[in-house]
Image (cartoon, helix red, strand yellow):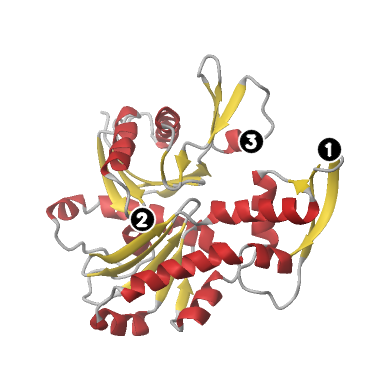
C-alpha cells in the first residue's frame, strides 16, 4: 500500500530545509544545482553542486535558482525540488502534501511560480505560508494570544520583520538584505581594500568564522586566499574581524531600518505588548555574531536569538501543515509549544 506524506519546505535563497511530519528536519542542503549547458541534464544538486561553484568548465553551469527569496529560474527550481522530494521520500510514499514558506510581500506571480514548480516536482497539494509566521510557530511562540510579538527572520536572500498576534501577521516588511548581502559586502571590501578577488564560498567562510555586526571585545584574524587584481596570481592575505564589522555595517543598518518601519506603523496597544514580549530572531543569517546585541541596543527591546534559529522556519512550516484546514478557513491556528 502506497501512502501520501506531509512535507514542509523552507525554500531559501541559500539553503533548502525539509521537514517531514513525524521525523523532523530530514534534509538541509544548499539551494544550488549544476547542469550540462548543452543537454540541460542535472549533474549535481545541493552539497555536491555547491562544491562546484566557481570551479566548473565551460560546458557546466552552476545555478542558484532562488534569488531574494523568490524563484528566479523556474526550470532549475523544479528540478531541484524534484530531487529533494525524491531524496526524502520513502519508496511507499507518493505525491506528498507540501507546505512552502515565502517572504512577506511576494507578488501573485511569484507565488504561482513556487506552486507550479512544486506541483510539477511531484507534490499532490501545495500550500504557502509567510516566513515570519512559520518562524514564530517553529520557535514555539504562542501566536494565538491577543498579544503582539516581533519576529525577525534573517535568511539568505531576505530579511522579514513581522508583528504576530492572534494567529496572524499584523504588520510586516520584507527587504532583500540578508546573508547573501553580507557575503557581497565582504567580497567588495576585500576587492576595494586589498585588490584581491575572492569567491562566494570564501566570503561565506569569513562571515561564519570572524563575521560580526557588533564589535567583538577582542579582535580576531584569519588568512584567506584569492586572486590578485594586480598580478593576476593567487595570493594570501590576512583580514580581521574589526574591518569585517565595518564592511557589514550598511547591511546591518538596513535591517534595523526595516524594524523601525514596522514599529512605526503599530497601534499603541501592540507597542505596549512588545515592550514586554520583545523581539525574536530566527534564520541562518541571524547567526552572525552580534546581530541580537545590535538590535537590542538600538531599539531598547529585549532581543532573543532562538535556539536552532536556522531550522525554525522549516519546523514551523511542517507544523502549520498539520493545521492546514484552519489556515485555509482563516481561523486561529492552535499550535502546541515545542
Residue 155 picture location, percent across and down? 47, 55
| Position in image of residue 244 (x %, y %) | 69, 63
Tag 1: Cα neighbours inside 10 Å, few (<14), some, or many (≥20)? few
Which residue does the numbered mark 3 point to in the structure image? 53
Please tell me the numbered disc located at residue 266. none
Alpha carbon separation for disc pair 3 and 1 = 20 Å
Question: Image check: 198 left or right of 139?
Answer: right
Q: Is residue 277 above or below residue 290?
A: below
Q: Quadrant of residue 132?
A: bottom left
- The answer to whether any part of residue 306 appears in the image is no
Mark 2 packing: few (<14 Cα in 10 Å), some, or many (20+)? many
Left or right of 270 on screen, residue 252: right
| Occupied quadrant, residue 134 | bottom left
Q: Earlier in the sequence, mark 3 or mark 1?
A: 3
For the N terminus, which image quadrant? top left
Q: Which residue is mark 2?
A: 131
**Residue ID at (49%, 65%):** 254
Q: Is residue 293 above or below residue 307?
A: below
The one nearer the camera, 180 or 149, is: 180
| Foreground: disc 1 or disc 2 | 1
Instruction: Look at mark 1 in the image and give the residue it sits on.
Output: 232
Amino acid at each position: 500500500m502506497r501512502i501520501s506524506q506531509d512535507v514542509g519546505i523552507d525554500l531559501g535563497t541559500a539553503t533548502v530545509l525539509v521537514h517531514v511530519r513525524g521525523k523532523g528536519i530530514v534534509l538541509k542542503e544548499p539551494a544550488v544545482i549544476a547542469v550540462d549547458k548543452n543537454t540541460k541534464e542535472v549533474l549535481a544538486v545541493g552539497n555536491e553542486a555547491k562544491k562546484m561553484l566557481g570551479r566548473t568548465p565551460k560546458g557546466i553551469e552552476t545555478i542558484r535558482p532562488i534569488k531574494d527569496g523568490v524563484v528566479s529560474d523556474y526550470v532549475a527550481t523544479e528540478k531541484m525540488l524534484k530531487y529533494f522530494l525524491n531524496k526524502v521520500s520513502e519508496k511507499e510514499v507518493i505525491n506528498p502534501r507540501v507546505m512552502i514558506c515565502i517572504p512577506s510581500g511576494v507578488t501573485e506571480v511569484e507565488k504561482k511560480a513556487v506552486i507550479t514548480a512544486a506541483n510539477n516536482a511531484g507534490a499532490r497539494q501545495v500550500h504557502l505560508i509567510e516566513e515570519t509566521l512559520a518562524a514564530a510557530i517553529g520557535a514555539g511562540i504562542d501566536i494565538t494570544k491577543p498579544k503582539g510579538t516581533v519576529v525577525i527572520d534573517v535568511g539568505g536572500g531576505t530579511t522579514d520583520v513581522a508583528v504576530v498576534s492572534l494567529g496572524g501577521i499584523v504588520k510586516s516588511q520584507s527587504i532583500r538584505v540578508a546573508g547573501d548581502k553580507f557575503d557581497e559586502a565582504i567580497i567588495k571590501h576585500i576587492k576595494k581594500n586589498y585588490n584581491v578577488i575572492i569567491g562566494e564560498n570564501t566570503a561565506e567562510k569569513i562571515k561564519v568564522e570572524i563575521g560580526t555586526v557588533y564589535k567583538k571585545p577582542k579582535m580576531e584574524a584569519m588568512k584567506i586566499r584569492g586572486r590578485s587584481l594586480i598580478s593576476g596570481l593567487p595570493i594570501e592575505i590576512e583580514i580581521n574581524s574589526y574591518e569585517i564589522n565595518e564592511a557589514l555595517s550598511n547591511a546591518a543598518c538596513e535591517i534595523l531600518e526595516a524594524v523601525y518601519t514596522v514599529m512605526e506603523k503599530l497601534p499603541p496597544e501592540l507597542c505596549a505588548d512588545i515592550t514586554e514580549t520583545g523581539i525574536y530572531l530566527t534564520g541562518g543569517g541571524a547567526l552572525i555574531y552580534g546581530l541580537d546585541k545590535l538590535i537590542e541596543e538600538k531599539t531598547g527591546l529585549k532581543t532573543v536569538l532562538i535556539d536552532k534559529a536556522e531550522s525554525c522556519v522549516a519546523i514551523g512550516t511542517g507544523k502549520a501543515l498539520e493545521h492546514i484546514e484552519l489556515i485555509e478557513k482563516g481561523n486561529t491556528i492552535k499550535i502546541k509549544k515545542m
